[in-house]
Image: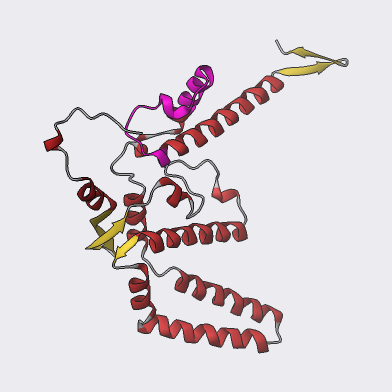
């Protein structure tokens, strides 16, 4: 599909150069508080979705505190694994493997790997069940550390760049805005993103639509519950409470 642009042909860049300038970008990202230059391949919406289930919105519809410790840990692992897939796909210079190989060769990591082998041996030979659980918990902690060697400040800045949080209006979107947009979409028989003003990527519009409908459904459920509470049963028949 071609799009008409009101510009002179001489003002437009060469198509290949345009692709080169806007596919792999070099940005300053923090690494434990210190900034360096990293080249990132900008993934499209489909490629980003292939990395895992995540939202570009700054809202949380599900309270993680209601989950068990096991569920919470599983949730953390899923997020970290998704982040790792993004880094593998998008880090160009240095590449994910280059950074991982360097971190994996540090003395600290070598010592931890040796400790992990010792803990595995202790778990196999220990007879006391409680002591075995202690060893297992220590083993999980060390394996988690080795599984996620990238610092949090780098990971957060990297993903923000990849999903373009700072170059769009997605950070300004609130639950109230999503709910209002979904109500308008319900009346107009279209999508919540059609009623959201601002600059958004295709991926962000998908999240606006998804979470807008979720919030509207929750709102309708609350309305129905409030209607039920406002009624009472009298001698086998239901009447509204005055």
**Which residue sits furthest right?**
235
Task: Please tell me whether residue 201 belongs to the stretch shown in magenta.
Answer: yes
- What quarter of the picture does the N terminus occupy? top left
Left or right: residue 99 versus residue 75 is left
**Magenta region:** 179-204
Above or below residue 25? Residue 178 is above
Q: Is residue 193 left or right of residue 158?
A: right
Q: In percent of the image, x 59 and y 31: which residue is there?
A: 218
Q: Position of residue 42 (x, y in %)?
A: 33, 52
Residue at the image position 24 percent from the left and 53 percent from the top: 20
Residue 43 image position (x, y, % from top left): 37, 52
Q: Residue at x 55, y 50 (%)?
A: 64
Residue reaching furthest left?
10
Side of 167 relative to 54 (left or right): left
Specify the quadrant that holds the C terminus.
Answer: top right
Q: Quick check: is 44 in the magenta stretch?
A: no
Q: State whether residue 11 is above or below residue 192.
A: below
Secondary structure mostly taken by the magenta-highlighted segment of the chain: helix
Taking 57 as reference, is 6 above or below it?
above
């Amino acid at each position: 599909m071609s799009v008409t642009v009101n510009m002179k042909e001489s003002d437009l860049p060469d198509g290949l150069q345009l692709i080169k300038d806007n596919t792999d970008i070099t940005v300053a990202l923090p690494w434990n508080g210190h900034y360096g230059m990293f080249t990132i391949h900008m993934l499209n919406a489909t490629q980003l979705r292939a990395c895992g289930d995540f939202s570009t919105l700054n809202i949380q519809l599900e309270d993680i505190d209601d989950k068990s410790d096991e569920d919470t840990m599983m949730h953390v692992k899923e997020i970290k694994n998704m982040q790792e897939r993004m880094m593998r796909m998008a880090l160009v210079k240095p590449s994910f493997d280059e950074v991982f190989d360097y971190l994996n060769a540090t003395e600290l990591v070598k010592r931890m790997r040796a400790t992990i082998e010792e803990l595995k041996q202790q778990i196999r030979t220990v007879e006391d069940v409680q002591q075995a659980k202690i060893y297992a918990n220590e083993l999980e902690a060390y394996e988690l550390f080795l599984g996620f060697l990238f610092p949090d400040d780098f990971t957060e800045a990297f993903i923000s760049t990849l999903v373009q949080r700072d170059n769009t209006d997605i950070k300004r979107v609130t639950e109230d805005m999503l709910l209002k947009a979904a109500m308008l979409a319900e009346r107009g028989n279209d999508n919540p993103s059609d009623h959201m003003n601002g600059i958004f990527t295709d991926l962000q519009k998908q999240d606006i639509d998804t979470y807008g409908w979720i919030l509207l459904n929750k709102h309708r459920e609350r309305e129905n519950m409030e209607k039920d509470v406002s009624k009472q049963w009298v001698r086998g028949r239901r009447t509204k409470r005055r």
